[in-house]
Image (tube, rainbow, N blue to C red):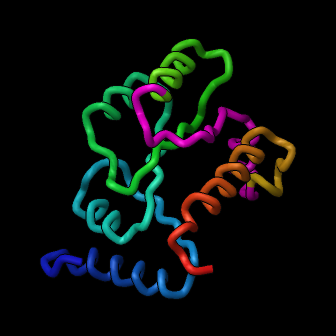
Amino acid sequence: MSTNCSPTLGAIAEAVQQLQGQYRWLLLDLPAGYSPLTRELLTLCDRSLVVVHPDANSHIRLHQQPLPANGDILINDLRVGSQLQEDLYQLWLESQPRILPVTIHRDEAMAECLAAKQPLGEYRQDSLAAEEVLTLANWCLIHYSAGRAA
């Protein structure tokens, strides 16, 4: 960690490092972009998932902004029946080598569980989104645990 970071940033980074010693997995929801806070916290992460929405804005940004060195791309909110999203998804499969084989489709169950303030897997465990989030979790366990002690 750099020594010239702000006191707040230093405190956050220190807390993250302390928690990393206590838990096998630590998930950070970081803002998009390259603010000083995001850059500093990304250096503490073993892996990162760059969540993208299949639209023109994300397509442009994927080709303009570099991914973090340890980052993979997760497609979120993919709509069945959207020709534009399907075309972008197919293009990304060809042009983005770090795209995950798991996608999260648009599912009303996600909005419902948020409104009910319940975990998706408990509120609508039969939903497509719950199945895909579980698949993502299993994929991460298999592929991101390789270098970690059990």
Left or right of residue 70: residue 65: left
Q: Which residue is found at the position 47% from the left and 59% from the top?
A: 29
Q: Is residue 111 magenta?
A: yes
Q: Position of residue 107 (x, y in %)?
A: 71, 35
Q: Please name the residue shown 38% across and 57% down the image.
A: 70
Is residue 116 positioned above or below 27 on the image? above
- Left or right? Give the position of 79 relative to 123: left
Q: Please name the residue shown 54% across and 62% down the image.
A: 144
Q: Residue furthest top?
A: 83
Vertical arrangement, residue 81 with respect to residue 40, above or below: above
Q: Position of residue 105 (x, y in %)?
A: 66, 34
In-front residue for pair 91/149: 149
- Residue 113, position in %: x, y? 74, 49
Dividing the picture into quadrants, the one containing residue 44 is: bottom left
Please provide percent x and percent y for residue 45: 40, 67
Residue interval drawn in magenta: 94-119
